[in-house]
Amino acid sequence: MRLPRRSLLAAAPALLLSGRGAAAAQPLETVRDWRTGNAALGPPALDSGRLYFCGTRTAGCVSPGTGTPLWERPHGLPGPAVFRPRLQGDRVVVGGRAGIACLGREDGRELWRHVARIQTGVPAVDPDTVVFGDGHEIVARDLQSGAERWRFAAIPDTLASYAPCISGGRVFAGPGDGVLYCLDLATGRRVWAQERRGLWQYLRQIHAADGILVAGSYKEQLFGIAPDDGSILWQFVAGNFINSHHLAGDLACLWSPTGWIYAIDILSGAVRWRHQTTDYRPGGGDWASLMAELTSRAGLLYTLDMDDTLRLLDLASGDLRGQGRVPGRVRHAVLPVGDRRVVFPMTDGSLRMTRMPFAR
């Protein structure tokens, strides 16, 4: 008998933490390992064919074709750099709750830094500006010089932890006070605000595509929002909390602990397809929970579960196209880099590049 959808987390914690592997997945081939000067790594980034990483102590850059980092330097932040590096022009922005650092892309030298007044959140970067939360404030700094451009204060005693969205000369932020703010990127002036405390406290991700904002609540809803006034165009209820959603073209993909990966049309909110991961019945081939962010490349959706099994789904249909087990323990992030190669941050502080054996 299926468990009620809203009680899955309370009634079946063991299932959610460990899950069951499906039909035995073969180990992925290890292509290369890079040792770093970190006890733990955040999610890596790929830009212009190079990999960028950061962690407890250092930030660095590697080429998939070489065995040693092109550069690696201490990032000098008061705490670990846990956010995925953001690349823009000749700059790399890394950071964590203790601060943000802007580094040179070619050599990693520090160009400027912001030390948190309270706690810094995930940054958003455009060609000229870095925008992030610090406590209950939204802060904008000039990408080149690091000079502060403006601050916008939401409600005190909240934390703007999740990344804002920069689109069309505006900043969209849901910093934890139940309000979605639209701010002018140049000045920080409030353009509009929508109070939605009945629907959300935080908006954990806000993406802009095809003239629409796609945002996930910290509860179980995904929203399509009009950027001109913040009105809700559609909402999808996942039936339990959702992990961070991923935009791939006109699809928003997410996993719900009810046991499904959903692909949602971002213009209508309709479900294009869904793929079952878990049925919560004895003897089933359940996946473990998907805590890593979903990502995509070349028409495939990459999903990594907490049993370190990577599965590739067809973005058009949701059909399974390939799977494999990661050799070793992953810090639950996945980065496809092309030619069937996939990079993972490992629990020992290394980066491991593997190759998928097939994708049917």
Image (spheres, rainbow, N blue to C red):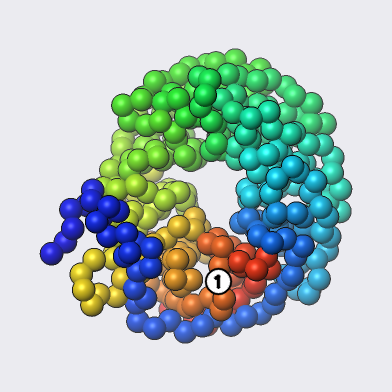
Q: Please state the horizontal and vertical placement of residue 242, each as a whole percent of the image.
A: 37, 49
Residue 327 or residue 360, whichever sits in front? 327
Q: Amino acid at mark 1?
A: Arg
Quadrant location of residue 277? bottom left
**Residue furthest toward the left?**
1
Q: Please state the horizontal and vertical placement of residue 14, each as a whole percent of the image.
A: 33, 64
Q: Residue at x 77, y 62 (%)?
A: 37
For mark 1, does the 10 Å Cα neighbourhood hold few (<14), some (14 to 19), or many (20 or more) residues?
A: some
Viewed as shown, does residue 2 lie left or right of 200?
left
Residue linked to disc 1:
329
Residue 117: tell me if it is visible: yes
Quadrant location of residue 342? bottom right
Q: Quadrant of the C terminus?
A: bottom left
Q: Residue at x 81, y 52 (%)?
A: 74
In the rendered image, the vertical position of residue 320 relative to residue 115, given as above or below: below
Viewed as shown, does residue 14 lie left or right of 310?
left
Q: Residue at x 37, y 72 (%)?
A: 320
Q: Quadrant of the N terminus?
A: bottom left
Q: Residue at x 32, y 59 (%)?
A: 13
Residue 156 or residue 232, whichever sits in front? 156
Mark 1 lies on a secondary structure that is loop
Quadrant location of residue 195? top left
Residue 129: tell me if it is visible: no
Q: Please state the horizontal and vertical placement of residue 231, each as a whole percent of the image.
A: 37, 25
Count of residue discs: 1
In the rendered image, the vertical position of residue 24 relative to residue 200, given as above or below: below
